[in-house]
């Protein structure tokens, strides 16, 4: 997320090598960002639903999957674009405008993005359903009133359902903007472009809140800082 945003913050790199570098490096790290969320969803599913304890051994495979797929998507985008027609969109470089460039961008970015969104949604649904069933069983086996004690756990469980919404919120306007670019090439809608860039730029913030701002992380920070 940090590197994906950094190369956008750089702004207008003019033309030539730096223009290519900004376009492709931003693409690489933005793809890697949403692919990492699928490894988190996979880990939760493997431990909660399938009761496997080997997820730490899969870390090298996670790195190969994320960085390898990001590289392949970036290379395909590079091959599919005519480098002589690289253009700037506002303050950023974007390889080849027009319908062909939009199709290449869809194949190398938005197709894996929405694949990740669907995968995360299905996976978290199965995880939440499993934990809800476990909670009901615990309530049924308990002689005491369980609801007050279960409330914090269920709050954490229900929060997982918001994780797929981060990608949807961050990239829905970008997807709509690309579809509009394909239908009406060369005609930009200002407010849609603002929402496209603005929401995508907030993905790192959304991820840091959803994945990082929880009781376990806060407790670890407080312990480290002696608070």
Image (cartoon, grey):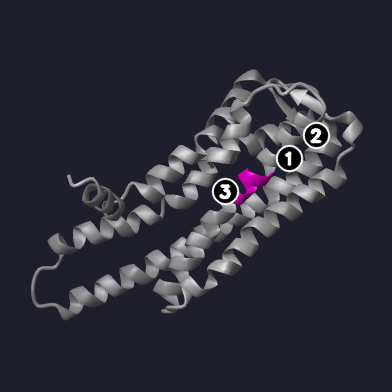
Residue 16: give its label: none
Residues in magenta?
28-32
Residue identifier under label 3: 33
State the residue in front, 203 or 13: 13
Helix, strand or loop at label 2? It is: loop
Labels 2 and 3: the sequence-earlier one: 3
Labels 3 and 1: the sequence-earlier one: 1
Residue 95: give its label: 2
- How much space separates mark 3 and mark 1, taking CA atoms? 14 Å
Image-based side of 82 in relation to 30, left or right: right
Q: Residue 13 placed where, x, y %?
A: 72, 24
Labels 2 and 1: the sequence-earlier one: 1
Q: Residue 206 placed where, x, y %?
A: 44, 41
Q: Is residue 94 visible?
A: no
Crowding at mark 2 (Cα within 10 Å: few <14, some 14-19, many 20+): many
**Quick check: marks 2 and 3 in contact, CB under 8 Å?**
no
Image-based side of 2 in relation to 216, left or right: right
> For residue 60, which quarter of the picture?
bottom right
- How much space separates mark 2 and mark 3, taking CA atoms? 20 Å
Residue depicted at x 37% and y 71%: 130
């Amino acid at each position: 997320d940090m590197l994906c945003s950094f190369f956008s913050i750089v702004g207008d790199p003019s033309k030539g090598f730096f223009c290519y570098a900004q376009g492709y490096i931003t693409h690489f790290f933005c793809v890697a960002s949403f692919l990492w969320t699928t490894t988190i969803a996979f880990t939760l599913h493997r431990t909660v639903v399938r009761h496997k304890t080997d997820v730490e051994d899969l870390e090298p495979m996670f790195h190969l999957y994320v960085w390898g797929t990001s590289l392949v998507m970036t290379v395909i985008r590079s091959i599919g674009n005519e480098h002589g027609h690289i253009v700037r969109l506002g303050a950023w470089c974007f390889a080849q405008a027009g319908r062909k460039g939009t199709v290449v961008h869809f194949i190398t970015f938005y197709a894996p993005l929405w694949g990740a969104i669907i995968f995360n949604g299905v996976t978290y649904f199965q995880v939440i359903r499993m934990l809800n069933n476990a909670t009901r069983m615990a309530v049924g086996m308990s002689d005491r009133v369980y609801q007050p004690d279960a409330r914090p756990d269920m709050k954490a469980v229900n929060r997982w359902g918001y994780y797929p919404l981060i990608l949807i919120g961050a990239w829905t306007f970008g997807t709509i903007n690309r579809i509009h670019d394909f239908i009406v090439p060369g005609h930009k809608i200002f407010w849609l472009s603002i929402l496209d860039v603005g929401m995508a730029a907030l993905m790192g913030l959304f991820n840091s809140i959803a994945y990082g701002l929880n009781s376990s992380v806060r407790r670890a920070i407080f312990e480290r800082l002696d608070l």
